[in-house]
Amino acid sequence: MSATETAAGTPTVARAAAPSGGGEPETVLKVDELHVTFSRAGRKIHAVNGLSYRLQAGRMLAIIGESGSGKSVSVRALMGLLPPSASVSGSAVLGDNELIGLDERSMRALRGSEIAMVFQDPARSLNPTMTVGAQVSEAIRMHSEVSKKEAQKLAIEKLRLVRLPAAERRYHEYPHQLSGGMRQRVVIAIALAADPRVLIADEATTALDVTTQAQIMELVLDLQHRLGTAVIMISHDLGLAACYADDVLVMYAGRAVEHARTAQLFSNVRMPYTKALLGAIPQVGAAPHSRLNVIGGHPPDLGALPEGCSFRDRCPRATEQCVERPPLDEHEPGHRFACWHPVDSKEELQ
Ligand SMILES: Nc1ncnc2c1ncn2[C@@H]1O[C@H](COP(=O)(O)OP(=O)(O)OP(=O)(O)O)[C@@H](O)[C@H]1O
């Protein structure tokens, strides 16, 4: 698949999901019944509403959904990066550590060493007044007691690991001297400074051009396979999810509504919301300036979530039954979805 198709076309599954080595990989993160609410102007905003999933070593889980569906808030909750107005409950176990409710000091110790995050804008993630090498060295020294000289050596190794061209020379350069793609490589090197088990990429390639985006995704995939890092990729881009992720979780109004292995999900989408998301992707070859096939209606007000299925007001298949909330059940092995009237994409294709 070309990078252009990845970014703009209908997703096709290009990658085998199975990890190397055979057998089921180790589960590194268990998220159960995660809830996040914000208090805003006397209202409670229910941003995440009972999210549960498992993340395995060496695999990539893509969390996808429209803007405001709770993707970022759900991962920031794991990192302890939400403002004080947020109230978080549920459980997220990473190795031997329960992340939810952890005090700031313990969380700080885990951030970077066990779980790290890469954000959308590499320019804002880096300190413009420090060389990139000094920033990677600093991250290494934050997590291990090594001399400055040793940290510099390790930092250059990290910069080579993320395939920064001419790593030794670039070590002494400032962020503004690097391209956007190179800066994102540096940000990834910093995130990997202490070899975390889980790497979260929150729209990490959105600000990059399509070719650079593909290169960064290939890098993440390579690191995931070589180091056994588990990756959570937050994205609007179903094409990226289809191409790189092993598993896909679709969020709507703070809930998981469909969750399956990538190939399984894209070959037989069951949840009407996922189908609508797929329909909203611009097609390769579409007439220039043709209208985007956006999903009609609006996501529900998170301050007053309706009873039942949150998608029902926008769903062409909704019936009276949908005033009762469908559970996220495993209807087929490995394929969970929350819908009373699922589509059968396989049947529709016939
Ligand atoms: N600090 C906050 N205070 C109040 N509400 C918030 C706060 N942060 C996020 N929210 C609300 O939580 C909801 C989910 O936000 P979140 O950023 O997780 O969405 P998202 O799916 O990541 O969207 P996007 O793709 O646009 O980043 C949104 O409705 C947002 O308004």
Image: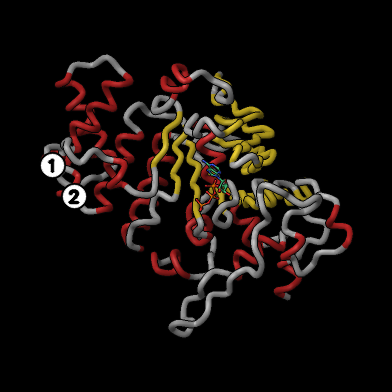
Instruction: Please tell me which of labels 2 and 1 falls first in the chain.
Output: 1
Q: Which mark is residue 178?
A: 2
Q: Nearer the viewer, residue 96 or 101?
A: 101
Residue 166 makes an appearance in the image:
yes
Label 2, label 1: how far apart the Cα atoms are: 8 Å
Quarter containing the C terminus: bottom right
Which numbered circle lies on residue 64? none
Within-10-Å neighbours for mark 1: few <14, some 14–19, many 20+: some
Residue with the most extreme top position = 145
Asked if the residue at label 2 sits under 8 Å from ligand 1, the reply is: no
Q: Name which residue type carries label 2.
A: Leu
Q: Residue at x 54, y 65 (%)?
A: 12
Image vertical order of residue 126 relative to residue 318, above or below:
above
**Rendered view: 60 above or below 212:** above
Left or right: 271, with 325 as reference point = left
Residue that carries the numbered disc 1 in the rendered image: 173
Q: Specify the farthest residue to the front.
A: 41
Residue in the image at 30% along x and 44% along y: 124
- Near-viewer residue (299 or 108): 299
